[in-house]
Image: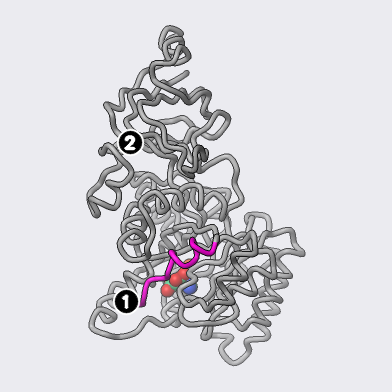
Amino acid sequence: MATLITDIGELTTNVARDGDPCGTLRGAAVLVEGSRIAWVGDRADAAAVAAVRAGAAVVDAGGRAVLPGFVDSHTHLVFGGDRADEFEARMTGVPYAAGGIRRTVAATRAASDEELRERLADLVAELHSQGTTTFEVKTGYGLTVPDEARLARLASEVTPEVTFLGAHVVPAEYADRREEYVDLVVGPMLRAVRPHSRWVDVFCERGAFTPDESRRILDAGVAHGLLPRVHGNQLGPGEGVRLAVAAGAASVDHCTYLDDDDVAVLAGSATVATMLPGVEFSTRQPYPDARRLLDAGVTVALASDCNPGSSFTSSLPLMIALAVREMGMTPAEAVWAATAGGARALRRDDVGAIAPGMRADLVLLDAPTRVHLAYRPGVPLVRAVWKDGVRL
Ligand code: NIG
Ligand code: FE
């Protein structure tokens, strides 16, 4: 069954043209056949007319904006409990500390598969309703061999982009035996999650894992066929960015505290800098400087980091608004970062753009331009979402 979405006021294709990375078309139409995009062009083009004659269902966008489905390349969606009390305390001045992760670990271990699956399904519905059509999910709240394996398995039920984050923090029971914990991560835990995972991640930060431990964990993951990505430079300056680039990571995430060397190293690499402004919103830390990275030629992605501690939001429209207001990005750069940028961070070439052959993942806004995502913050502007050609 074919669908023609027509009278699109502003179409963001992300197929760069005439110096416009968003490849913006006006008065456009998109033809979807099955799960893929079959054709993109002017709504008055003969191909659009022929599609209607051939019986395609017609969706009239009424001059509104259409863009690729958002690609959220960084989430922690499988967990039990919540930490609203920590957020409330932070808003009175208590600083964020990675140690709070252990509370979610305890709640997650105590939850049944069914409870975790239901919570996950609710969160996935939340993502979809806000225009996210591709998302990554990390483990990291189990931190035992069976718990990490079950989180990876549950995540793999909702996405192919599963990341093993056994190196989230050292769990309480290993507090005095961290080397033993790293041995567990690179051995039995890695083997148990491997069948369900595509990526390996490590939280390289003071209070989490040292650069040497992080390197060992990434190397072990790569030796098992996983692709590396890194949480780095979130809570202070450090080795995270350099480590990620040296490991050939697809992405280094957070990038809140960068020195000139970090920026130069990123600029000379294929590693994406993924910014997670929901974290700065929710922890009252300074926002990362995306402008500095973009001006240096670094590829920037925007993601939600949805998790119960540092960023309990799944809204990429909110990330776009924050990136524009607080991080020096233009609306076009922010929308690109939340779509094509996320696809780069996940090394995906079938999502993040609207072109023939790509997956038919599309968002129709209740607004005439993508600028409205930042201009009208907090307003639910997502009017319709298609995932693999199916309207959600
Ligand atoms: O990406 N940085 C480490 N992990 C999460 C926080 C998780 C938590 O606080 O529960 C993050 O911000
Ligand atoms: Fe994270």
Q: In this view, does 253 lie to the left or right of 372?
A: right
Q: Which of 126 and 47 is in front in this view?
A: 47
Residue drawn at (37%, 47%) of the image:
125
Residue drawn at (51%, 52%) of the image:
341
Q: What amino acid type is highlighted by mark number 1?
A: Arg
Q: What amino acid type is highlighted by mark number 2?
A: Ala
Q: Residue 366 bears which disc, if any?
A: none
Indicate whether residue 291 is drawn in magenta. yes
CB-based contact (under 8 Å), mark 1 and mark 2: no
Q: In this view, does 330 lie to the left or right of 16?
A: left
Label 1 or label 2, whichever comes before in sequence order: 2
Residue drawn at (60%, 80%) of the image:
239
Indicate whether residue 368 is drawn in magenta. no
Ligand 1 contact, mark 1 (Cβ < 8 Å): no
Image x and y of residue 277, in percent: 38, 65
How many residues crowd mark 1 within 10 Å: few (<14), some (14–19), many (20+)?
Answer: some
Residue drawn at (63%, 74%) of the image:
242
Tag 2 secondary structure? strand
| Residue farthest along the bottom direction in this orientation | 176
Per the image, the residue denoted by label 1 is 284
Q: Which of 323 and 54 is in front in this view?
A: 323
Eye-nearest disc, 1 or 2? 2
Image x and y of residue 181, in percent: 64, 81
Please state the extent of the stretch shown in magenta in the rendering: 284-296
Per the image, the residue denoted by label 2 is 65
Q: How far apart are marks 1 and 2 (CA)?
A: 33 Å
How many residues crowd mark 2 within 10 Å: few (<14), some (14–19), many (20+)?
Answer: many
Image x and y of residue 360, in percent: 49, 32
